[in-house]
Amino acid sequence: MEEAAQQIELKTARHVIAQLRLQPTADCVLGSAPECDVEIQGAEVRPRHARLFMQRGALFAEPIDGAPLMVNGRPVQGAVGVGQGDWIALAGVLVQLSTDTVAPLAPAPESAERIEILVGRQSDCGLVIDSPQISRHHARVSIIDDQVWLEDLRSTNGTSVNGAPIRTPVTLTPGDRVAFASFVFVFTGAALEPAEIGNMVRVEVNALTKEVKDRTTGAPRRLLDEIDLVIDPGEFVVIFGTSGSGKSTLLDALNGRRPATSGQVAYNGVDLYGAFDQFRSGIGYVPQQDIVHRKIRVISALGYTARLRLPPDTSREEIATLSERVLERVDLSEKAQLAVDTPEPLSGGQLKRVSLAVELVANPNILFLDEATSGLDAGTDKKMMRLFARLAADGKTVVCVTHSLENIDCCNLVALLHRGCLVYYGPPGEAAAYFGVERLSDVYELLEQGEAEQWRARYRASPLYQTYITARRAATPAPIEAPQQAKGARAKRPGTSLRAGLRQMLTLTTRYADLLLSDRINLLVLLLQAPLIALVVGAVFDIGGTLPERAAAEGQVTFVLVLSAIWFGCINSAREIVKELPVYLRERSVTVRIPAYLTSKLVPLALLCLLQCASFLAIVTLMLGFEGPFLERLATLFLAGLAATCMGLAVSALVNSNDKAIAALPLLLIPQFILSNSVVALSGVTEQVARFSVIAYWGLDAMRATLDETLRTPLPGSERALIEVQASWDDSMLALGGLALGFLVLTTLSLKLKDRRL
C-alpha cells in the first residue's frame, strides 16, 4: 500500500514559519540557507542543519553532518521519531511541529517518575540557549508525577515566571511565561516554546504617559501623552520629532531607565516595569555620551565589560572570542589593540562604534540608541544607520533617537513625536506623502500650525494606525501584568551576592589600575611631585639651633608634611569619578554595586598615596636629619592623605563636570590651612568645626605627638609647651579614621543619589 503524503506545520507560540506537504520519498531540509525547504535564521543555525523524512508512515527528524539538534529537550545524534506537538531545537532556535502523524512508540524507560531537562548555554543541556547572558547550567525543568517543576540553579541573571523571580522550585501551568535572563518562553503544557522566533524581543506600548511637575508653575506637565506603539521582533525603529517633543523621554520609558507615570510597556507579553530585573541584562543602551574609557585598549575595554556583565562561569577564552566577534561586527577589528586616545585618535564614528561594541559584548536582545549619530558627518551617519539596520537583521530589536533625517530610509519604521504625542508611526518612505510635504524635514514647520492632539487624532483615524498598531495588537495575546510583589520592585540586581561583589571589585580594580598605568605621563607627574616638593622642603628648612628655634622649625616641617599629604590625596581623587560618569552610570544601571566601585577606586589611590607619603617623608627625614618614629609618622601622613582621598572622591561624586571638581579644590584645601590650629590658635566654635571636619587639625596634632618629648613638655617656669598637643597619637589617628569614614559615607550617598539618573 502506497504511503500518503503528510501535512506539516512548523511554528512558534505566535507565528507559523512554514506549511508544507511532505511526500514519502522526499526530504524536508531545515537550515539557514535560502535554498532549504524551510529557512530558519539563527546565530548558530547551519546552512543545512536537519532534515524531516517519512519512513513506513512515520515522521522522523535527523541532524545533518552532526549539527546540534534536540527533540523535546533531548540531544539527538541520529534519526528520531517525531509527531504532533513535539518541539525541535536547531541550536538556539526552537520550533513546534504540528502534523497528523503520531511519533513512533519507543520502549518506556525503567523509571519514568522523574525526567529532568537542564537549561543553559552549555551543549550538554537539554534546552540550549546560546547567549552570554545565560549561565552554563541556568535552570532545571523536572517532570514529576505529571507535574512540571522549574528551578533556578543560582544563575547570574535569574529565572522568572510571569515576571516574578523564582528563588525556590515552582510548578508550571499552561500559558505561563518563563524567562531565563531576558529570553522568554511560553509553557504550552507539553513544552517550552520561545515567545518569539529566535528569542527576539517584541515591544508593545499601551497608553504610555509621563507627567512631571512644572518647576515654574507647579502644575502637572505631560512629556508623553498616551503613546501607543507595537515594535515587532528584529525591527529597526527611528524616533524623531520637534525639539522638546519627548524623544529621549520616550526612549527611556521604553527601556525602563525612567519609567512612565502610567500606561504599560511589555516585552514579549511581560510587563517591563514590573519585571525589569528579568530583562535588565538583555537591554543594550548607548547614550549620547561615550561609555568607554579613552586610555585603555579597545579589546581590553570589551573584556572588562564582559567580565562585569556576563555570568562568572564565562571563561577568558569565551570572552576573548566574543570580543573579537563583536569588533568584527562593528568593523573595528584592526583597532582592537589600540587605545581610543592613540597618537592617531579614533574618529567620531569609530568612537561611537566602540561604545556600541561595549553594549554588544553582552549580546542584548534589544538595543536603544540615544542620538548615537549626533555630531557625525553625513557619510559617517549613513554608515552608522546601515550598521544599526544590519544589527536588526541579525535579530536584535533596535530603537534609535535621531535628529538627522537624511538616512532614516535605512530603518523599517519611524515614530514622529510632537509635544509628547505620537503623530505618525509607519514606513519612512510614506511619511512625507502622509503629511503632504515634499521633504520630510518640512514636516516640523507644518506640525507647528496645528495642535498636537489634532495631529494625533488624525493619525489614529488613518489606515497606518490600523496596520501598524491595531492589527499587530490583535495578533498577540494581552500582556501579562507582573505580580504585585514584583511591581516596581527592582530589588535585587544580578550579581548581588558577596562572591559577585568581590568579583566586581577585582575587575573594577584591575581596570582602574590599567587606566592609571596607561596614562604614564600623568602617573609620572603624580609620583614625582612628592620627591620634588620634599627636595624643596629639605633645601629651605633647618631644624637646628636652640630649643625654641628647633621647636618652631619642626612645627613648620610637620605642618608642611601634613598639608602636602592632604594635597596629594585631594589632587589624586577629585576627578576620578566625575571624569568617567557616563561609564559609571551605564554600568551601575546594569550590574555594578557601589561598594565594589568605591573599593576599586580607593585601593589603587591608597597605594599611590602611600608611595607619595613614603617618598616625601623619607627625603625630608634624610635631608633634615628629622629624628623620630618614621613608621608612626608615615602612618599619620598616609591616614591624613587617605582621608583627603575620600574627601576628593566625595567632591567628585557630588559634581557633574571636571571643571567643577577642579574649582572645588581651593574650597577643600584653604580651610585645611586656616583651621589646622597652626596658623591661628583656634577656640570656641571654630575649634569645634575643625574637630569635626578638618583633616589637617587631627593630622597635625598626630604629627606633633611624634616629635621629641622635650618640645612637648612645658619649660621650667612656663605653663605652656613649645609645641602643644591636643590629644594622644592614638586618639588623633582614630579621629582621622573617623573623618575618612565620614567622607566615604558621603561619597556613597552622593553616588546613590545619582541612581535617579539611571
Image (cartoon, rainbow, N blue to C red):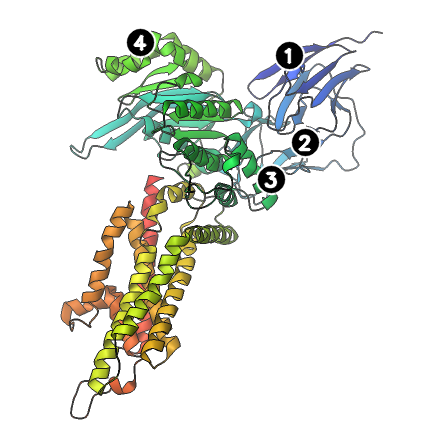
Distance from the alpha carbon under mark 3 to that under mark 1: 33 Å
Residue most extreme to the right: 1
Q: Nearer the viewer, mark 2 or mark 4?
A: 4
Distance from the alpha carbon under mark 2 to that under mark 4: 52 Å
Viewer-nearest residue: 260 or 64: 64
Q: Residue at x 26, y 74 (%)?
A: 557
Query: Is the N terminus in the top left, top right, bottom left or bottom right quadrant?
Result: top right
Distance from the alpha carbon under mark 3 to that under mark 2: 13 Å
663 sits to left or right of 490 = left
Distance from the alpha carbon under mark 2 to that under mark 1: 23 Å
Q: Disc 3 marks which amino acid? A: Ala
Mark 2 sits on what residue?
73
Mark 3 sits on what residue?
139
User: Which structural element holds mark 2?
Assistant: loop
Q: Earlier in the sequence, mark 4 or mark 1?
A: 1
Q: Disc 2 marks which amino acid? A: Gly
Mark 4 sits on what residue?
435
User: Which structural element holds mark 1?
Assistant: strand
Q: Which quarter of the figure has residue 383?
A: top left
524 sits to left or right of 421 = right
Mark 1 sits on what residue?
19
Residue 607: % across, % down: 42, 62
Q: Which quarter of the figure has residue 355?
A: top left
Distance from the alpha carbon under mark 4 to that under mark 1: 40 Å
